Image (cartoon, grey):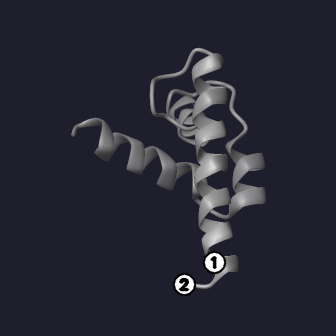
């Protein structure tokens, strides 16, 4: 793995951790990212910014985060 790839992987982990921290500070579940929480809100017909997050991070980003969180939550 090249140094650039290592740095990208590290930054990805840091950004994910910051997303979880933001979510918890705003009253969300433990180990749930802000993206996953927004998808959860969308499923409950609550106000959300899924459209904004997905437009920045890629189609279905929030859905994929939510699915990953639901699967890991059962461990």
- Asked whether the residues under the numbered discs 1 and 2 touch, taking CB atoms below 8 Å apart as contact, a structural biologist would say yes
Q: Which residue is drawn at 45% across and 25% down?
A: 30
Callout 1: SS: helix
> Which image quadrant for residue 1?
bottom right
Identify the residue at the far front of this view. Answer: 3
Depth check, front residue: 70 or 4: 4
Quick check: can you spot residue 34? no
The residue beneath circle 1 is 5
Q: Which residue is drawn at 67% across and 68% down?
A: 7
Residue 11 x, y percent position in the rendering: 67, 58
**Position of residue 8 in the picture relative to residue 67 (left or right):** right
Depth check, front residue: 11 or 25: 11
Q: Residue 1 carries which label?
A: 2
Check the image and report above or below for 28 versus 3. Answer: above
Residue 52 x, y percent position in the rendering: 78, 47
Q: Residue 20 carries which label?
A: none
Residue 27 x, y percent position in the rendering: 58, 14
Identify the residue at the far bottom of this view. Answer: 2
Check the image and report above or below for 9 versus 25. Answer: below
**Position of residue 19 in the picture relative to residue 29 (left or right):** right
Check the image and report above or below for 58 versus 71. Answer: below
Q: What is the CA distance from the residue labelled 1 to the residue labelled 2?
A: 6 Å
Depth check, front residue: 16 or 11: 11
Callout 2: SS: loop
């Amino acid at each position: 793995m090249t140094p650039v790839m290592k740095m990208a992987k590290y930054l990805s982990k840091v950004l994910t951790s910051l997303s979880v921290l933001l979510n918890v500070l705003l009253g969300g579940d433990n180990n749930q990212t802000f993206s996953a929480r927004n998808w959860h809100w969308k499923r409950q017909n609550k106000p959300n910014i899924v459209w904004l997050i997905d437009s920045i991070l890629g189609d279905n980003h929030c859905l994929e985060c939510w699915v990953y969180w639901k699967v890991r939550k059962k461990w």
